[in-house]
Every structure is written in structure tokens, then in C-alpha cells.
Image (spheres, rainbow, N blue to C red):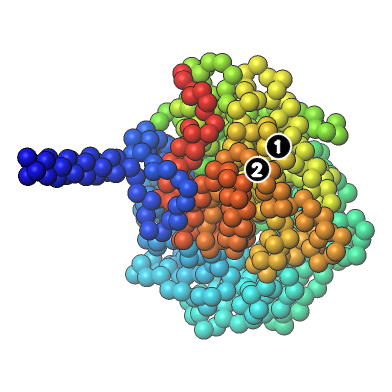
Amino acid sequence: MIRLATALALCGGWLGAATLFAQQAEMIASGDNLVVEGLPQIPAALAERASRYTEFRSADLFDWHPTRREILIGTRFADTVQVHQVAMPGGDRRQLTFFPDRVMAASFRPHTGDYFVLTKDAGGNEFFQFFRDDLATGDATLITDGKSRNTGLVWSTAGDRVVYGSTRRNRNDVDFYVMSPAEPKTDKLLAQNEGGGWGVVDWSSDDKQLLASESISINEGYIWLVDVASGKKTLVTPKGSTEKISYEPVAFGKDGKGVYTLTDHGSEFMRLAYLDLASKQETYLTADIPWDVESARLSFDGKQIAFVTNENGISRLRRIDTATKKQLDVPELPTGVISHVQWHENNRDLGFVITSARSPADVYSLDVTTGKVDRWTNSETGGLNASTFVEPKLISWKSFDGREISGFLYNPPAKFTGKRPVIVNIHGGPEGQSRPMFLGRNNYYLNELGIAIIFPNVRGSAGYGKSFLQLDNGFLREDTYKDIGALFDWLGTRDDLDASRVMVTGGSYGGHMTLAVATRYSDRIRCSLDVVGISHLVTFLERTEGYRRDLRRVEYGDERDPKMRAFLDKIAPLNHASDIKKPLFVVQGKNDPRVPLSESEQMIATVRKNNTPVWYLMAKDEGHGFAKKKNADFQFYATILFVQNFLLEPAAKP
């Protein structure tokens, strides 16, 4: 009997172990690169149901080939975005680079196209390096120092040199360097600068001068000329005015007598202007457009400027004749957000990227001679019919001071009845703007879980004029938190939205907003998801990378000033963490140079003292957000589980 009992016990143990093994096999593994704390195991069935929503692709226009009608794009087929070549509209995407980390940009050598220079970092650290990729051999050669942050590469008119900004000297200031990518040993320091907001946008036609920008903040910027022979800098726009003016230079005029720039001088919005270098007289070319001109590109022959206006979040592509100053016709394009506008050297083909709620980012081109529009890429949508995806509605509500705040509401499909739970997703920046772009994985919450999503544009957001942009600066920071409180009030007036089931989320500054809302309005939400968010603006300013610290002080306030420090300390979510009573999920990249890892870890340690449920996901190989697909997928599946556990009560059913 003893032997039989022992055998049965052993058999039961084996069976139990087998059952446990089978159960474990039905869970998804996180990978050694992820730190996972407080999360339950994620069922494989959940990942299987949601997996199609991870297979969306997109395409960014990197550059035109200078002599052929071909393009370089950035797209992802494996884990990260890499450089691909497309030889014709709708043609195959031929992958040219195979790095473990993402490629951020790529630019052909002008006039010849025998090689291109690409930009990439390591593990999301944003200390970007340049590599020369030789098309004949496929070899990629590092041409920068491998240590500093290198940005803003611009080719000379002759195509034999590049100028770029680098923090090489002291890690904080962005200086200008010049080199021939074919011979990296020619690299030399051209001009020392003070601050992290410097960049070069253009070379003069004779390659004797550089057109440079100095950005103090989104509301303040200046134009400089740099002598290529001596490195001497000459200020073009005046400094010292009590009115903060933003200048964003675009290009030299072809005769070298003036420059094109975007500026809000004398206006609430950014306008396209021509600045005469001798008289300093400004001629406004878009004075009749009551919206921001957000980007502009001059054709290689200098005869046309293509520019994009931001009209209540929707983009419009426009052209202007530089001789007559008159606008030229542009055919009707798909409605959406336009970016990455680039001219071909033939001055005929104009490339750009369009994304919308129903289409991932894809590359298009316009033949400005015939008006023909070509679509170069058709990005996959995981087998889902994106044409059925929800289009957003522009909404608005009154805040505490009577100011109107707006945003975009995505309602779930009609198959979901009754009041719907809500995710409030706050953009970063803080000078960003939520716009009707493709939602990617977020479509799962709409289409499969029946959750409405609101993307608010609180005060301080771009796109609504420079006065609105400054309404959250310094001591006004709390007013933007109150805009979300007013949104919660608005939710309570709706018959279709459930104000009792709300999750707030956001990334970067949106993560800071998430934490602030979670402390101030804990009774108005079910849970919160903070992605690379700032928990204390003082500790953030003290620990963010030096090249960006002064730029952020203009927005948030200078923590070295005792009064400002006391104010920032008073409003810090970290110092009110005891008020977070609802479940919190924190996502962070270990290598984040903008919002350091310490911002998340100090918040987690404090909230855990409340006995509040805290989930923590940290990737050792990521920075300011997850760029690698495998990490982003795991974050997505974990977020679905978080939403199901804490927001969907009762569960949403079609």
C-alpha cells in the first residue's frame, strides 16, 4: 500500500508538473532584455488575438537618388527600421541595411549617388553616429567618433562635404564640424557654439557660407551666417527684444542676397518669409494663411518652394513661385498629415509622406509639371482592412478659465453599445500636438475592446498660435493639468462615454501629465499608464542630458531659481504619490537620454508604499520609448492585460 501510494503520489507529481509546464507554455516570455515587475503572466491566447495589430508597417522618405527616379525609405520588416531602396512607384522595397538598432535617416551623396550617409544610435541612447554606406560593396563605415551626439547632416552644394552638429567637445554644446564622408580624416571643427539648440540648414550656392539656426525655445530662435573658411558667425536676426520671436531658416535664395525662413514675427502663426540680408527687410509670402506653416523646402533651382500648413491638425501641401510670389496649383491629395517633403534634383518630382487614421505613413510624389501623383509604398496593415478604421471627430470643451480646449475623439464601432469606457491619451512635447494620424496598435482598443480614445490638445500645444503655446510655461504649469480635469467634467455630460471608466496615459511629457492627473484626479480614473514620464521636473532638469537642459528650462522653468524650484517641488507628482490610489503601469527605457531611468524608478518606489498595484516594464536595450518590435509587442500585450484587469469593468462586449 505504501509503495502504491508513493507511486500514485509520484505519478500525481509528474502529472501536476506536466500540467504546470503546459500552463507555462501557454504564457508569453518577456525576454532577458526586459525587467518585468508586478505584471501577471500574459496568456499566449491574448497575444494571438492581438498579434495582427502588431504587424502594421509604415514608410518614411529618406532621400531621392540624385540622378535616377528612385528613393531611399525607412521601413521595418524585422525588428527595427532599416534603409530600403525603391526603384519605382509601387516597386519592391530592397533592404540595404541590417543593423540591430534603428536607422533614423539616410542621405545620398548629391549629383552621383554612389554612396549614402546614414544616421543611427545604439539601444535608443540618441547619441547618433554617421555611417557611410557604399552601394557597390554594401559596406557601412563609421565616420564619426562613436561617442558624441551627431545631428543635422547637410551636404554642400558641390556634394563633396557635409556639415553637422556634434557634442564632441564637452557633451553639452552643439558645435559645427565639416568633413568629406569619403575621407573621414578630413573631419574638423568649424565653429564652437554655446547651447544645444544649434543646427545648419543650408550651404550657399558657392559653398562659402552656411545658414544656421539657434533655437532657444519653440518661441524663440535666431538666424546666423557662418563663414566656411574661418568659422566666423554673423547674427542676421536681432536679439534682445522683449518680444520672443521664432525664426526657423529654410534655405538661401539662389542669388545669395537673402534667405527664406519661417517666422512668427508680427503674427500668432508661423509664416513663410523672405529676409533680405542687406536691408534686413522681411517679405511675408503667406500672410493670407491663418495657420502655421510647419515646414518648407526650396527646389534645387530656387524657382519654387513647397510648404505644408497645419490647418486644425490636417496638413495641406502648397507651392509658391519665388519670382512672382504667387501660389501654384497642387492637386487634391489624401486627407491626413504630411511630412518629409523633399525635392528631387530634377526640380520636377516632389516627394512627401502622408498618414491618416485609415492609412499608415506612406511615400507619395507629385510631378509638379503634369500634376500627376504617384504612390511609392503601400504599407501592410496586418491583413486588417484599414479603410474601415474609425475616423476621429474634432471635439472641444471649456476649461476652468473659460478657455476652449480641443482634441480628437475616436469612437469604437457601432457594434459596441452603451456607454463606452475611455482612454485619454496625452501627447508629449509638451509643445506637441495630437493630430489625426494612424493609430497602429491603438486600433485594437477601439475595434476589439470597444474603448473610446481621446487625444486632447491642452494649453501649451502647438498649432493654435504662439500665445496658446506659452500658456503652460513656468508658473502656469498647473493650468494644463486642470484642462484634463475639465475634460473629465465634459465626459460626464456625454451619453455615449462612461465617465466612471477612464484610463489616462501618455508618453514623455504626456507621461508627466499622466502622473500629475493620477495624483490630482485619482477619484476620476480607474487606472493610469505612464510611458517614459517625468515624475519631478526638478530632478528631470538636473539629470536630463546637458545638450537639452537649457532648452527645457525655458519651458518648465529654471530649477536653479529658488522660487521656481519651490513651485516645481510643490506640484511634483513624486511628492504627491501618496494620492495615487488607482493601479499604475510604468514603462521605461534604460538608455533614455531625455527622461532618465531614475524618473520612473523613484516614482515606482514611492507609489508602492501606498500598497497601490504597480506594474513596471523596463527595457535594457531601449531609450525614449520602445523602438524594437519585440519590445513594443510585449508592452502592447501587457497594456491590454492592464486595461482588461482595471478599466473594463464590466467587460466590454459587442
Q: Position of residue 211 (x, y in %)?
A: 72, 67
Which residue is nearer to you in this view: 266 or 405? Answer: 405
Question: Does dot 1 land on a helix, a strand or a loop?
Answer: loop
Q: Which residue is mark 2?
A: 580
Q: Is residue 331 found left or right of 639 in the rendered image?
A: right
Report the residue at 40% width, 31% height from top: 384
Q: Callout 2, which amino acid?
A: Ile
Mark 1 residue type = Tyr
Q: Earlier in the sequence, mark 1 or mark 2?
A: 1
- Residue 258 left/right relative to 618: right
Q: Residues within 10 Å of mark 1 (few under 14, many from 20)?
A: some
Q: Residue tagged by mark 1?
A: 521
Label 1 – label 2 distance at C-alpha: 9 Å
Say above or below: 154 vs 289.
Answer: below
Give the percent coordinates (x, y) of residue 277: 83, 65
Q: Position of residue 579 (x, y in %)?
A: 69, 43
Give the number of the mark in front: 1 or 2: 2
Could you tell me if residue 601 is visible in this image?
yes
Q: Say how many tags the image has.
A: 2
> Residue placed at 88% from the left, 49% from the top?
266
**Residue 287 falls in image quadrant:** top right
**Which of the image's four quarters has the N terminus?**
top left
Counting from the top left corner in percent of width and height, residue 48 is at 34, 36
Q: SS at mark 2?
A: loop
Say the numbered circle drawn on residue 577. none
User: Residue visible at 46% across and 70% down?
Assistant: 132
Identify the residue at horizontal 77%, vertical 75% (top origin).
233
Can the viewer see residue 390 in this picture?
A: no
Vertical order, 582 against 489 (above or below): below
